[in-house]
Each structure stands twice: as C-alpha cells, then as structure tokens.
Image (cartoon, helix red, strand yellow):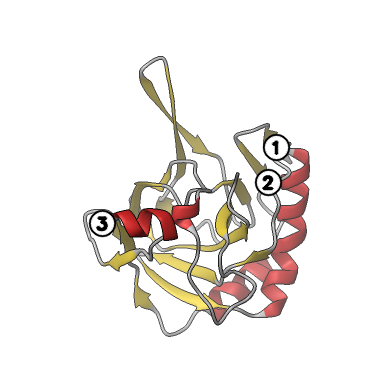
Amino acid sequence: MVSAINEWYTFNAGTIDRKTCNKIKKHGSNWIDAKVNIKKEISKEERVLGCEPDWKENNLLRVSDVSWTTDQWIYDLVWPFMAEANEMAGWKYHIKAAQSSQITRYRKGGFYSFHTDGNGDHLSVVHSPGNEFIHGHVRKLSMSIILNDNFDGGAFEFASYGKEECTITPIEAGAGSIIIFPSSMEHRVAPVTKGTRYSLVTWFVGPPFV
C-alpha cells in the first residue's frame, strides 16, 4: 500500500483479486459511448441555485465506452477502501453515498484528456430529486480500480501545478490496483496503444464544502 498525504492514495496491484476483476469486467453490458460535461455559460439565477451539467460527446476530450451499475456487491467492495483512504490520507471528508459505478472500456486509441470529476461548491451539486442518497451532494472523492493489465499505454496520470510549472505524474498500477483522490484533482488516461483497458470508476459524494 502506498499513500501520498493530501494528494492521492493507492492500493497496490492485486488488492482486488483477478477473479473479482474479471467478474466486474464481464458485468459490463449495454456499452454506450462516453460523454463529457461541457461547461456552459451560467446565468445569475443558476449561479445562486445551481445548474445541471450539459453532457455531450466530444471525441477531442474522450474516446471510450462505458457501462453503468448500481449493484450492491460492488458498493460493498469499494466502500471500505474509500473509508480507509479518506481517514489515512487525512482528508476526512464527510461522505454520505456513492453515485452509480462506471465500468469503462478503452480500446486501442482510446483516451480521456486531463479533466476533473467535480468541485465541492454549491454550483456542482447533483440534481437528482428521485435519489435521496445523492441529491444535493457533490463529488468529493473519486476511485479508479484497474481491472486488467494486458494492454499498452493507458497510463493513469495526475497533473499538479507549482512555480508556474505543470508536473505530470504517472501512477504505477496493475490489475487490481486502486487509486483514490479528491475529485477536484486534474487527471487523465493516456491513449491506449495496444489491447483494451478496463477500469471501474466510482464517485463518492457528500454535502458541499462550506
């Protein structure tokens, strides 16, 4: 187990055994093209009350396909790792629930450019009145579990800034690795050059930061 306090927290390859990784991979079905949140101009009213994201396909930012799951056994699997990282990394965020988990498939040439998963402000709240667990909350922690290692490229990388310079840090990860980080951190999946990369992504939510 390796950690970087106040930055990211990782569990080594094999933390999730290959049998479970393969089970999650096979769980993927009804694959759809991934979409990204395109920022739009926010009105004065939306700035006060919040606004819903504008989801569109953008092949300049992301090329992959996804499958969604809300199976309880997956939540039971990932929650303890999130709780440990949240405590040991010193974040100690108020986490209330998790959004639907995303099984992501990057074929050869697939990628996801640098982006953030969410912010903790009131403009970023989830609007889902029918789901009491996530409605009104924001993404606070993100988790990516690497499900296989028989591909080339596809590195998970963070971008950090200091002294007017950008530093790109690749994370060493193999099948069964878990990467957990604040959702506001900039990160990407580099292009896959051979094979197909699979991952499970889960976002953990709580009340907006004050």
- In which image quadrant can residue 90 be found? top right
Label 3 Cα crowd, 10 Å radius (few <14 / some 14-19 / many 20+)? few
Choose mark 3 or mark 2, whichever is in front. Answer: 3
Query: Is residue 204 shown left or right of residue 38?
Result: right
> In 3D space, how far apart are the residues under numbered discs 2 and 1 (Cα atoms)?
7 Å
Choose mark 2 or mark 1, whichever is in front. Answer: 1
Label 2 Cα crowd, 10 Å radius (few <14 / some 14-19 / many 20+)? some
Label 3 SS: loop
Which residue carries the number 1 mark?
2
Tell me if label 2 and label 1 are in contact, CB under 8 Å: yes
Q: Position of residue 182 (x, y in %)?
A: 57, 45
Q: Amino acid at mark 2?
A: Asn
Q: Amino acid at mark 1?
A: Val
Q: Amino acid at mark 3?
A: Lys
Label 2 SS: loop
> In 3D space, how far apart are the residues under numbered discs 1 and 3 (Cα atoms)?
38 Å
Q: Position of residue 100 (x, y in %)?
A: 56, 72
- Whichever of callouts 1 and 3 sits on the residue coming sooner in the sequence is 1
Q: Nearer the viewer, residue 119 or 117?
A: 119
* The N terminus lies in quadrant: top right
Which residue carries the number 2 mark?
12
Which residue carries the number 3 mark?
40
Q: Nearer the viewer, residue 45 or 157?
A: 45
Q: Residue at x 27, y 67 (%)?
A: 56
Choose mark 1 or mark 3, whichever is in front. Answer: 3
Q: Is residue 35 something one can see in this rendering?
A: yes
* The C terminus lies in quadrant: top right
Q: Is residue 169 above or below residue 100?
A: above
Query: Is residue 193 shown left or right of residue 24?
Result: left
Query: Is residue 178 shown left or right of residue 188?
Result: right
